[in-house]
Image (cartoon, rainbow, N blue to C red):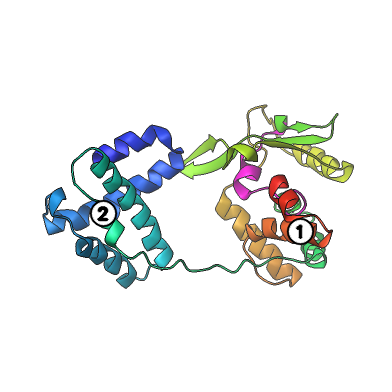
Amino acid sequence: MDEWLKIVKPLVERATYKSYDNMVSARIRPHFEKLNLLLTEVEPKHIKMLYDEILEQGYTTNTVIHYHAVLHQALAYAVKNDYILSNPADRVKRPKKNKHISSFYTKEEILTLLDIAKDDPIYIPIVLSAYYGFRRSETLGMRWSAIDFENKTISISKSYQRIDGKDVITLPKTPKSKRTITVPDFLLADLKDYMNSIYCLEDTDRLFQVTKYFMEHEMQRGIKNSGVKRIRIHDIRHSHCALLFEMGITPLEVADRL
């Protein structure tokens, strides 16, 4: 596992590597140290024991699927380097993923929430997500220099993560996520007012200097005050999709826009 982690570290995003490292140190290494096996002695039943332990501790099958992906990749690396002849994880039945049914707002619900949140820190992030499909990490990673007031555009080229208690700016989730969008005058005016309210904002500063948890908390507070149904802040992006479909935009165009 340690050798595989060293190989994969420069190939994945920092947050992804941190997730892999946490899974190895928290459960995978202790489990197999306890079994005291050679790598060549690991069988599917030993991997299944780990998965059962995770489920018994109250975690969902989705958590097991993440562990399975890490173990499978590491053991595939072992096969490739002739440490073992076959991958025992191939013969472990992966549990079915729990399906999350995405909730979303209608246009009326979005307008109701925005009306209540007009003077709250969450107002502009909701607008960016509901009308332009911003991911939460993209909103938090945005710098004021990304806004072109003359050409009325916003460039999305950064993403925000919180790793080991530190703010980390990375590239967006996928290569196509780097994009430039056109925005209307009302949003530019709101952004200018917001920027003027921040003291000594530097070119490289994040425009929204808060955490994901703060945004989620403010979102739920706005929901409570407005009376609309409770959804996650990420589901606002799903609401953007719903609005586009209602306007007759094709699924391919929606996917490209997002």
User: Do we see residue 60 in this rendering?
Assistant: no
The N terminus is located in which quarter? top left
Question: Badge 1: how crowded within 10 Å, few (<14), some, or many (20+)?
Answer: many
Residue 201: which quarter of the image?
top right
Residue 174: x percent and y percent?
A: 58, 41
> Which region of the structure is painted magenta?
130-144
Q: Is residue 138 magenta?
A: yes
Q: In this view, does 231 lie above or below 131?
A: below
The disc label shown at residue 237, or none? none
Residue sticking out furthest to the front: 85
Q: Nearer the viewer, mark 1 or mark 2?
A: 2
Residue 86: x percent and y percent?
A: 23, 50
Q: Name the residue under label 1.
A: 117
Magenta portion: prevailing SS class: helix
- The amino acid sitting under disc 1 is Ala
Between residue 96 and residue 107, name the one nearer to us.
96
Residue at coordinates 25% horizontally, 40% vertically from top-left?
A: 2
Residue 58: which quarter of the image?
bottom left
- The amino acid sitting under disc 2 is Ile
Residue at coordinates 62% horizontally, 62% vertically from top-left?
A: 232
Judged left or right of residue 148, residue 5 is left
Q: Mark 2 points at which residue?
A: 28
Q: Does the magenta stretch include residue 151?
A: no
Judged left or right of residue 240, residue 14 is left
Residue 107: which quarter of the image?
bottom right
